[in-house]
Amino acid sequence: MLMPHPAVLRALVDRYEAATASEPLDAAGGPGPEARDLEYTLCVSTGTRDVRAALETARRLLAA
């Protein structure tokens, strides 16, 4: 697996957390468009398919 640069990964996690905290939910009650884009990018960057797993993997990589 390719390893994302730690600075890029940190920025993605920070932006995702900010987006989910401040962005209104969509009509279906899901995350807004920015958060969805960041979920996808985090999943691709960490080689996962679920945002929870992506965040867990990202935090583990950043702690190493």
Image: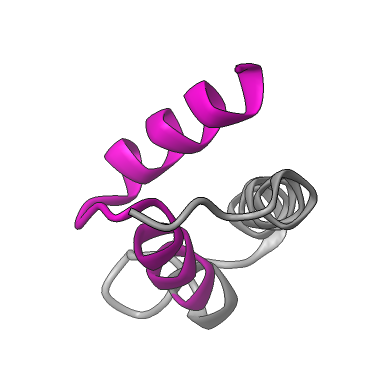
For residue 8, above or below residue 62: below
| Numbered label tally | 0
Query: Compared to 53, does 60 lie above or below?
Result: above
Q: In the image, what residue occupies the spot 35% across and 59% down?
A: 43
Which color scheme does this rendered protein use?
Answer: one colour
The percent position of residue 63, horizontal first and vertical second, equals 63, 17
What segment carries the magenta color?
A: 37-64
Residue 37 x %, y %: 49, 78
Q: In terms of secondary structure, what is the magenta stretch mainly?
A: helix
Residue at (19, 57) in percent of width and height: 49
Q: Which residue sits at x=58%, y=67%?
A: 24
Is residue 50 rendered magenta in the image? yes
Q: Is residue 49 above or below residue 36?
A: above
**Identity of the residue furthest to the top in this view:** 63
| Residue sitting at x 50%, y 82% | 33
The reply, left or right, for residue 49 in relation to residue 34 is left
Q: Position of residue 55 (x, y in %)?
A: 45, 38
Looking at the image, residue 7 sits to the left or right of residue 57; the answer is right
Q: Is residue 60 magenta?
A: yes
